Amino acid sequence: GNSVTQMEGPVTLSEEAFLTINCTYTATGYPSLFWYVQYPGEGLQLLLKATKADDKGSNKGFEATYRKETTSFHLEKGSVQVSDSAVYFCALDLNFGNEKLTFGTGTRLTIIP
Amino acid sequence: EADIYQTPRYLVIGTGKKITLECSQTMGHDKMYWYQQDPGMELHLIHYSYGVNSTEKGDLSSESTVSRIRTEHFPLTLESARPSHTSQYLCASSEYGAGNEQFFGPGTRLTVL
């Protein structure tokens, strides 16, 4: 079946540190890949996405590259801020069929000033 | 900002009561979803709909029911609430097609005493 495995948290970093949150997937076919972010007390919102191999999604200083050979979509940011503290979800969406999102378990990120 | 709304935001209710969680979107999306989010953050799809008069069970079995009489409205009902139903419920919607963003509402935090 389809699944998403992401780095367990919680992750705590100091402001301006480099961030990597690992995400790997198992899927039949060629999925679209997403990172969603959930700030405290809110619903999820799309952070970035990539729809085919070697695509790079980017937004708000975050980046992730769709790596088919390693079935990965790791999230990175060069210099984190306190405002980046949130829960991050990696997800996939099969490009055929009923197009339901399969989510990872989420990684809680806390940035310390 | 996503135009998807959930009410109430918080609900505390006694065992055995019937409740309806409201979800509305103004984006004209055909696809809508209900997720249950446990305290460990993991998201579980409990219901989804492809359009008016379409409802499907999700990946996690739930005692709740849903209806889709209008495109913009996707309410979730629990006939007899129990403490095991205590959770965060998130509604989402999206356009048809692969790789499309799901827009999430702010969630309803339900506590059953």
Image: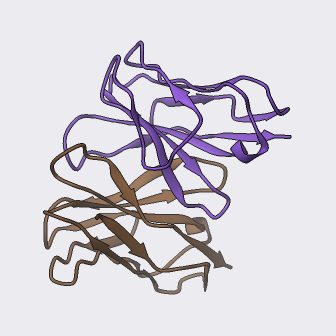
Chain colours: A brown, B purple
Residue A95 shown left or right of residue B27 in the figure: left
In percent of width and height, residue B25 lies at 45, 25
Say whether residue B1 is visible. no
In percent of width and height, residue B75 lies at 54, 23
Q: At 16% across and 52% down in the image, what residue appears?
A: A95
Q: How many marks?
A: 0
Of residues B25 and B79, the one drawn nearer to the viewer in this rendering: B79
Of residues B71 and A62, the one drawn nearer to the viewer in this rendering: B71
Toward which corner of the image does residue A109 lie, by quadrant?
bottom right
Classify the position of the C terminus of chain B by image quarter: top right
Toward which corner of the image does residue A66 lie, by quadrant?
bottom left
- Does residue B17 sit above or below A30 in this rendering? above
Q: At 41% across and 82% down in the image, what residue appears?
A: A78
Toward which corner of the image does residue A49 lie, by quadrant?
bottom left
- Does residue A22 sit above or below A60 in this rendering? below
Say whether residue B40 is visible. yes
Which residue is the extreme one toward the top?
B69
In percent of width and height, residue B44 lies at 50, 52
Of residues B95 and B15, the one drawn nearer to the viewer in this rendering: B15
Residue A102 shown left or right of residue B3 in the figure: left
- Does residue B63 sit above or below B51 in this rendering? below
Residue A69 shown left or right of residue A86 in the figure: left
Q: At 32% across and 46% down in the image, what residue appears?
A: B101
In percent of width and height, residue A48 lies at 33, 60
